[in-house]
Each structure stands twice: as structure tokens, then as C-alpha cells.
Image (cartoon, rainbow, N blue to C red):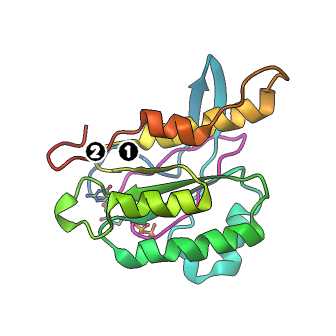
């Protein structure tokens, strides 16, 4: 699900991030995943729209009932970044009103081919009020964090007590995310 924006849904089934065919070991979509949040198991089920953005009527069906959506662009591909706005417009129209959205700039390991600056992702995310991080399906950078943040948010919503402080997913992501540097991605 890298290179073009895709949607993933978190629900009460199971799921995870699928490995790109280039070797890597981190799965962005496809398998079931259980994330433990504060001792509670949150089950995620992920669907990848897998380039079906050309067939939007099909794609709607994937995310209409999703509790969370991961929007991916490829930091080495400008059109994938430009497509994000269209996706956000679509999502606004078709997704659940309370859907959790996380914006991911993937392929952060290939800095030599970068065409989208981190700041551009940050600015877009701020504009739409969504959390943002750069990821690498190759090295695994921030991959677990993306799912953990979603799982925490969903768990919090499901079991929030009246006097419990609310969980701020954007603050959490900002405090936890790794930032790619020129020389290291860990
Ligand atoms: N270096 C690097 N390569 C990646 C990363 N993620 C995906 N790739 C490679 O990028 C290519 C495209 O990956 P896909 O996951 O098939 O991308 P996609 O555009 O979403 O493809 P569809 O799901 O079919 O739409 C493959 O060669 C992957 O191995 C990454 O984080 N780093």
C-alpha cells in the first residue's frame, strides 16, 4: 500500500501493515494484528485499497464503516502526495464522521529520492487536523507506532471514564515518532 494513498481500516477484527515485496519485514496490511494497549488487547483488521483509487465506487465500500484510516503517500512521488487532498475530500463525504485518520509519508528510508519534505506532510496534516508521521515499510520506522496510536485512540473511545483525561492522538504521535535524519532512520 505504498506509493499511492491507500486506506486501511481498524475494527474489532484483526490486521497489520503489509510487507512491500522489496524484502522488508514490516507488514502494512493484510494480516490480523493485535495491539496491547495498557494491558488490554485491541484487535485490528486492515484492508488495503491497493491502488483501487481509480475505482472509487469500489473503494468506498472498503472504508465506509472503517473506524480508522491510514492515508499513505510516497515521499518520492509527488502525485501520491497531491492525491491526499482528494482522498481527504472523499473521506469527508463517505467515511464515518468519527473516523480516526492518520497521515503517513512512506519510504522515508530513501532520502536520496525524496521529493516531498517532511514539513510539507506536517503542514498538510495540520491543515486537516490529523496526526502525521513518516514511515518506512522497509526499515519499520514508525510502523508499529501508527497502529499503536490508532489502537490507543479506539480503546480510549470505547472505554473512557467520565473523569479520565482524553487521549490526544496527535500529541501522542508527536511525542513518540522517530524523525528521519540525513544519516539514520532508527
Ligand atoms: N525503500 C522502500 N521501498 C518501499 C517501501 N514501501 C514500499 N516499497 C516498495 O515500493 C514498491 C511499491 O510497493 P507497493 O506496496 O506495491 O505500492 P502500491 O503503490 O501501494 O501498490 P498497490 O498496493 O498495488 O497500489 C515495491 O517495490 C515496494 O517494495 C518503503 O518504505 N521503502
Q: Where is residue 84 in the image (x, y as percent from the top left)?
A: 52, 71
Contact check, label 2 and label 1, Cβ < 8 Å: yes
Dot 2 beta carbon under 8 Å from ligand 1: yes
Q: Position of residue 5 (x, y in %)?
A: 49, 68
From the image, which quarter does the C terminus lie in?
Answer: top left
Which of the four quarters of the rendered structure image does ligand 1 lie in? bottom left
* Residue 7 is one of the magenta-drawn residues: yes
Residue at the far right in the pictured view = 162
Cα separation, mark 2 vs mark 1, equals 8 Å
Q: Is residue 71 visible?
A: no
- The residue that disc 1 covers is 26
- The residue that disc 2 covers is 139
Secondary structure under tag 2 reads loop
Q: What stretch is highlighted in magenta?
A: 1-20
**In the image: residue 57, left or right of residue 17:** right
Dot 1 beta carbon under 8 Å from ligand 1: no
Eyeballing the image, is 153 above or below 138? above
Q: Position of residue 174 (x, y in %)?
A: 46, 40
Within 10 angstroms of label 1, few (less than 14), some, or many (20 or more) residues?
some
Eyeballing the image, is 83 above or below 16? below
Secondary structure under tag 1 reads loop
Residue beneath the point at 70% across and 37% down: 154
Amino acid at each position: 500500500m505504498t506509493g499511492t494513498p491507500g486506506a486501511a481500516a481498524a475494527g474489532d477484527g484483526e490486521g497489520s501493515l503489509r510487507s512491500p515485496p522489496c524484502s522488508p519485514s514490516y507488514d502494512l496490511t493484510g494480516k490480523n494484528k493485535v495491539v496491547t494497549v495498557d494491558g488490554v488487547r485491541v484487535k485490528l483488521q486492515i484492508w488495503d485499497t491497493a491502488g483501487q483509487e481509480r475505482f472509487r465506487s469500489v473503494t468506498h465500500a472498503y472504508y465506509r464503516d472503517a473506524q480508522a484510516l491510514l492515508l499513505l503517500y510516497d515521499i518520492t512521488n509527488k502525485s501520491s502526495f497531491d492525491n491526499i487532498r482528494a482522498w481527504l475530500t472523499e473521506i469527508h463525504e463517505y467515511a464515518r464522521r468519527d473516523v480516526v485518520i492518520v497521515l503517513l509519508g512512506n519510504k522515508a528510508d530513501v532520502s536520496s529520492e525524496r521529493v516531498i519534505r517532511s514539513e510539507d506532510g506536517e503542514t498538510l496534516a495540520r491543515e486537516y487536523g490529523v496526526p502525521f508521521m513518516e514511515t518506512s515499510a522497509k526499515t519499520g520506522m514508525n510502523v508499529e507506532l501508527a497502529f499503536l496510536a490508532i489502537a490507543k485512540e479506539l480503546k480510549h473511545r470505547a472505554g473512557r471514564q467520565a473523569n479520565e483525561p482524553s487521549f490526544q492522538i496527535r500529541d501522542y504521535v508527536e511525542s513518540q515518532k522517530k524523525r528521519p535524519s540525513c544519516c539514520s532512520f532508527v
